[in-house]
Amino acid sequence: MIEVHKLTKVYTTPSQEIVALDNVSLSVEKGEIFGIIGLSGAGKSTLIRCINMLEKPTKGSVVIDGIDMTALQPRDLRTARQKIGMIFQHFNLLSSRTVFANVLFPLEIAGVPKKDAYKRVKELLELVGLADKAESYPSQLSGGQKQRVGIARALANSPKVLLSDEATSALDPQTTRSILDLLKDINRRFNLTILLITHDMNVIKESCDRVAVIDDSRIVELGRVIDVFSSPQTATSRSFVGNVINRELPDQLPRPPVGQIAGGVRRLLRVSFIGETAGKPLISSMIKKFDVDANILYGNIDRIKDTPFGYLTLEVSGSPDQVAESLSYLRGHGLEMEMIADA
């Protein structure tokens, strides 16, 4: 649905050139929720503005549903943008218009007949749970309600793509969750492709199928959210994941001696549980089957979108053969393992 190929954006000032995006490429499939995460200044907002062509890329291309946005003339670009919905961080509502009139606004611009436009607005206000606020003004709404108006407005022209630029960063955690639930519901109902920009890994964890990590104007990691959480490949990704799920053994816990011990060996490892394996008694089964000692030192269980996920830091000891067989048993049941300390 969205193809970004070798996209570069350079801002030129009298004294220097600032590279905001450097050779960025990514692909977003139809119907998925794709997240882009990065710190402030990493280039993520520039990327979303280049995708909807509010910023013209210096080099590269952006193709949406088979249309090369970078090749369009201004009139054709305005038409193409009507199929790209946009949700903003600070809502961008018209204070002099009611909720109904704010959602109606893009339909008026598109020249939709009044009867059809009014019907569409009523449907959208029902969808976002604001049918009773149709005649209210933005100043009378909470932050979450304002963002629901923004979402309804973004859906007015039945877009093929919905772009969200830090749409929950001004909201409290409970309201953020309700907005993310709404976006997931919209995604499921209409198979709508959603590109979501954020600096909060919790937003990625709750909502997204895949994620691109952007740092210093470049994509440094891209993959399924579950894979990035279970095995982050870059320091930037590890930092983001660590803000949500702590993978490290706390300093307050003593590190047991590892390697050769009386009667055998001891290993210290981190085990990742993903999906169905999170609900299986694999550790207890391993202990019974191979007669090893296992001590759970630290654990963290959570969900990534709809998938159970977690870590256990585990101390396993026994004879060399018993320990080797027990770890092989865990791997054979789909658990990811990382040796923290070894002989």
Image (cartoon, rainbow, N blue to C red):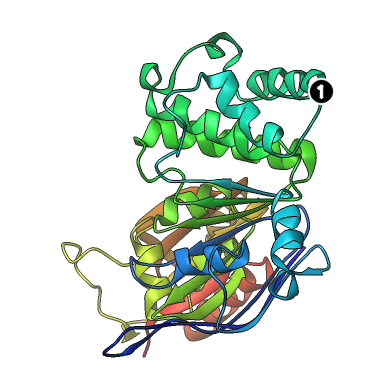
23 to 333, vertically: above or below = below
Q: Which of the 4 image quadrants contains residue 253? A: bottom left
Compared with residue 331, is residue 137 higher up or lower down, i.e. above or below?
A: above
Q: In the rendered view, does 192 fall on the left or right side of 152? A: right
Task: Give the image location of residue 95, x and y in percent.
Answer: 41, 26
Left or right placement of residue 5 versus residue 231 in this view: right
Q: Mark 1 points at which residue?
A: 116
The residue positioned 61% from the left and 39% from the top of the image is: 183
**Image coordinates for residue 152, horizontal then vertical, percent:** 62, 31
Mark 1 closeness class: few <14, some 14–19, many ≥20 residues within 10 Å? few
- The x and y percentages for residue 255 are 23, 72
Q: What element carries label 1?
A: helix
Residue at point 35%, 41% (across, down): 170
Task: Give whichever of 274, 98 is nearer the camera.
Answer: 98
Vertical arrangement, residue 60 with respect to residue 109, above or below: below
The quadrant in which the C terminus is found is: bottom left
Q: Residue at x 67, y 24 (%)?
A: 127
- In the image, 79 versus 254, the foreground residue is 79
Compare residues 172 and 341 and report the one nearer the observer: 172
Q: How many labels does the image show?
A: 1
In this view of the protein, which residue sits in the foreground, 212 or 114? 114
Which residue lies most toward the left here? Answer: 252
Q: List x then y, in percent, for residue 200.
A: 40, 55
Q: What residue type is labelled 1?
A: Asp
The reply to whether residue 122 is visible in this rendering is yes
Q: Can residue 291 be seen in this view?
A: no
Name the side, left or right, on which 65 lies relative to 315. right
Quadrant of image for the N terminus: bottom right
